[in-house]
Image (cartoon, helix red, strand yellow):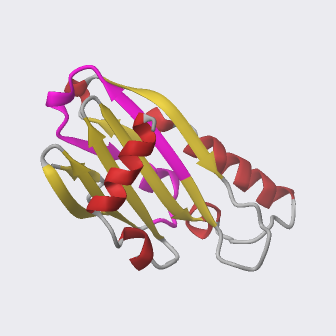
């Protein structure tokens, strides 16, 4: 089992009801963070409406451009996520899953960001600029698990920093 699979399992064990209890709410996303030694994994679930203003297949060029811009923004991990600077973290991998529009269900964007930190003991939090990028997003329900334990925090445009 690779390290990232182990992190995902660990997160699900420590936060057993995280996915079952999450309901789709426009303007509200979900962020799960797992910290393991020198690695931080951020799993983001974002309603497509918060990113582009609609949750269906694009109907015109303007909507197609909005989807492309949102995907480009979500792929810029260093602009969206700012771990404690003293931890000297660098992006290791990014996976952004845009909706496939296969049915009439609510559409979400799922993204995973993995950072590796040169000084993990200096890591005290992660700041996000996601609220500046997506004005329709007003809340991220964040949960984390790591060497200092587990916790939850609500992030918002006025409180964009998850600290531990």
The span shown in magenta is: 111-137
Q: Residue furthest right?
A: 60
Q: Position of residue 124 (x, y in %)?
A: 17, 40
Q: Position of residue 128 (x, y in %)?
A: 36, 47
Would residue 39 appear left or right of 8 to someone viewing this image? left
Residue pictured at 47% horizontal, 79% vertical: 23
Residue pictured at 75% horizontal, 80% vertical: 104
Asked whether 113 or 137 is in front, the reply is: 113
Q: Position of residue 21 (x, y in %)?
A: 40, 78
Above/below status of 133 relative to 88: below
Above/below status of 112 relative to 89: below
Asked whether 36 or 90 is in front, the reply is: 36
Would residue 90 appear left or right of 159 to someone viewing this image? right
Residue 130 located within the stretch drawn in magenta = yes
Would residue 86 appear left or right of 49 to someone viewing this image? left
Q: Position of residue 98 (x, y in %)?
A: 67, 54
Residue 93 located within the stretch drawn in magenta = no
Above/below status of 73 relative to 66: above
Would residue 143 appear left or right of 53 to someone viewing this image? left
Name the image quarter holding residue 118: top left
Quadrant, the N terminus: top left
Tag count in the figure?
A: 0
Asked whether 14 or 49 is in front, the reply is: 14
């Amino acid at each position: 089992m690779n390290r990232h699979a182990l992190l995902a399992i660990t997160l699900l064990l420590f936060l057993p009801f995280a996915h079952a209890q999450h309901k789709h709410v426009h303007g509200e996303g979900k962020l799960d963070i797992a910290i393991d030694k020198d690695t931080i994994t951020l799993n983001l679930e974002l309603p497509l409406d918060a990113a582009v203003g609609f949750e269906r297949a694009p109907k015109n060029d303007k909507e197609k451009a909005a989807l492309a811009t949102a995907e480009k923004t979500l792929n810029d991990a260093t602009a969206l996520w700012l771990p404690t600077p003293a931890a000297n973290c660098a992006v290791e991998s990014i996976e952004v899953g845009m909706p496939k529009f296969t049915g009439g269900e609510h559409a979400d964007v799922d993204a995973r960001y993995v950072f590796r930190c040169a000084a993990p003991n200096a890591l005290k939090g992660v700041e996000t600029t996601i609220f500046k990028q997506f004005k329709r997003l007003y809340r991220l329900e964040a949960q984390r698990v790591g060497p200092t334990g587990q916790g939850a925090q609500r992030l918002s445009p006025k409180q964009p920093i998850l600290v531990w």
